[in-house]
């Protein structure tokens, strides 16, 4: 009982359901395939499984499928036909047109009818059970089981482990305590999916082509390349952008890889509190494209070419295309051009900008008022004019004897030499002895 309560407490709160005549209004969580943080949106789903948007968007990958129109016979499937279908469809390969969740229950598709689950239950299954195959991934039918009114397909090995009970049994002999398991268990969880095709009363007589046509909303069996299979699941405009190798803001990382391939370089940075990853394509002097990724989405695209101003796109263009009705949220975003270097002005037609100043707009200083004659007002400095008699005649001034050059600069009072630099006076001569007469 305690484990049951703990498991219930960890589950996602149940959605709010409002009953209306013939319609049900539920809260749908729009999220990416990587189980990113979701936000609540209100979507109306009628009893036939058709979704109509009220105040939010619904990812078309989780919305209801378009029913097929395959003519079916009223006869019961014969044993011979069943064997031929098993031989034809066993190991048949196709491409996923929608996300395939893991889990024992799997998806259920009515022949020429709707898909179950769809909308919010579909999204909850992908979030809780995990993703087995993304749109465009290759699928292989590994097992087929025919029942009274349904055909069950195991894709990529199915969601259940082989020998679920025998893998827990071990056999030993001799009382030595050495036992060996009946089935070897590698410990890896199965990664496959389950798809059930149901009919009204019984499985009718049909061919393998009819079965593939009934499964077309979920699996495409046409011969395609991986990029063709993936783009067929997208809106026309988004498909055209990927095939033309054009990256749009709002694309997922898978879309970017299909459009322009793996990046030449990746750089991880942080802007404020938001971490992001910069994918760099190309090298100078060729044009270089910078694709900024946050989580699993493109939030910024920059194209830089030598000698040209960089072009930057920041407006999401994919969110509107992924709505159920396919209507865009806003007109197409235009590239924003960033000017490089100083602003170039035409002096003949454009005036130069005013120099920077600390004044406010319309502010006047006291010295700007010509009527202000107070002493405290600051005025321009007036330099006196030089007069002719400011200096005496240089020819009448004595020259400085220490001046070694030919300069005519007069010196009024030549500085005396320091005492230590003057030569000492000669001492007086000593008296000589004169010879006396004998």
Image (cartoon, helix red, strand yellow):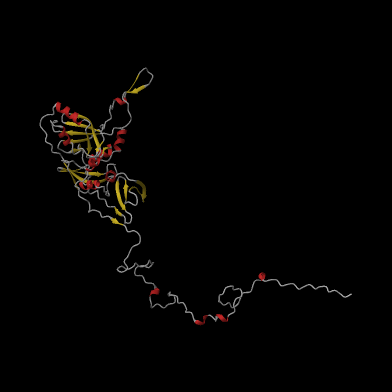
Residue 87 in view here:
yes
Q: Position of residue 350 (x, y in %)?
A: 31, 67
Q: Residue at x 25, y 44 (%)?
A: 29
* Residue 57 showing in the rendered view: no
Question: Of 258 and 219, which appears nearest the observer?
Answer: 258
Left or right: residue 370 versus residue 137 is: right
Q: Percent position (x, y) of residue 102? A: 26, 35
Up the image or down, 144 lies above or below 258; here it is above
Quadrant location of the C terminus in the rendered image: bottom right
- Quarter of the figure with the N terminus: top left
Which sits in the foreground, 90 or 249?
A: 90
Residue at the spot 14% in from the left edge and 26% down from the top edge: 80
**Relative to 209, 270 lies left or right:** right
Q: Is residue 140 above or below residue 21?
A: above
Residue 118's place in the image compared with 423, above or below, is above
**Res 32 quadrant in image:** top left
Q: Give coordinates of residue 123: x percent, y percent.
A: 24, 40
Q: Check the image and report above or below for 283 versus 138.
A: below
Residue farthest toward the right in the current orientation of the protein: 438
Instruction: Name the residue: 52% across, 80% down.
Output: 390
The residue sitting at the top extreme is: 174
Q: Nearer the viewer, residue 437 or 106?
A: 437
Question: Residue 37: x and y, percent?
Answer: 29, 44
Give the side of residue 29 with respect to residue 284, left or right. Answer: left
């Amino acid at each position: 009982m305690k484990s049951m309560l703990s498991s219930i407490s960890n589950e996602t709160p149940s959605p709010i359901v409002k009953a209306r005549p013939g319609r049900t209004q539920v809260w749908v969580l729009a999220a990416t395939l990587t189980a990113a943080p979701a936000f609540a949106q209100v979507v109306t789903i009628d009893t036939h499984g058709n979704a109509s948007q009220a105040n939010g968007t619904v990812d078309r990958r989780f919305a209801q499928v378009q029913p097929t129109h395959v003519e079916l016979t009223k006869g019961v499937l014969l044993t011979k036909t069943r064997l031929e279908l098993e031989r034809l469809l066993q190991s048949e390969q196709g491409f996923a047109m929608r996300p395939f969740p893991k889990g024992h229950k799997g998806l259920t598709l009515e022949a020429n009818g709707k898909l179950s689950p769809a909308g919010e239950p579909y999204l909850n299954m992908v979030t809780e059970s995990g993703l087995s195959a993304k749109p465009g991934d290759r699928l292989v039918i590994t097992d087929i089981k025919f029942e009274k009114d349904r055909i069950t397909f195991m894709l990529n090995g199915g969601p259940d482990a082989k020998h679920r009970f025998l893998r827990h049994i071990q056999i030993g002999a001799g009382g030595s305590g050495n036992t060996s398991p009946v089935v070897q268990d590698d410990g890896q969880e199965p990664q496959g999916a389950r798809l059930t095709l149901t009919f009204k009363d019984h499985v009718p007589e049909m061919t393998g082509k009819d079965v593939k046509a009934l499964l077309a909303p979920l699996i495409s069996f046409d011969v395609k390349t991986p990029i063709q299979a993936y783009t067929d699941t997208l809106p026309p405009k988004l498909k055209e952008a990927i095939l033309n190798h054009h990256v749009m803001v709002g694309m997922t990382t898978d879309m970017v890889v299909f459009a322009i391939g793996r990046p030449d370089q990746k750089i991880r940075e942080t802007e404020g509190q938001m971490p992001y990853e910069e994918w760099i394509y190309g090298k100078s002097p060729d044009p270089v494209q910078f694709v900024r990724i946050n989580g699993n989405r493109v939030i910024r695209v920059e194209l830089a070419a030598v000698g040209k101003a960089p072009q930057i796109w920041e407006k999401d263009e994919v969110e509107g295309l992924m709505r159920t009705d396919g209507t865009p949220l806003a007109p197409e975003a235009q590239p924003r051009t960033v000017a490089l270097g100083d602003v170039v002005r035409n002096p003949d037609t454009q005036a130069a900008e005013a120099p920077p100043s600390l004044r406010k707009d319309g502010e006047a200083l006291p010295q700007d008022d010509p009527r202000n004659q107070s002493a405290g007002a600051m005025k321009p400095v007036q330099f006196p004019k030089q007069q002719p008699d400011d200096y005496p005649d240089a020819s009448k001034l004595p020259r400085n004897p220490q001046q070694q050059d030919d300069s005519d600069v007069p010196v009024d009072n030549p500085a005396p030499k320091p005492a230590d630099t003057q030569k000492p006076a000669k001492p007086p001569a000593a008296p000589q002895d004169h010879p006396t007469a004998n």
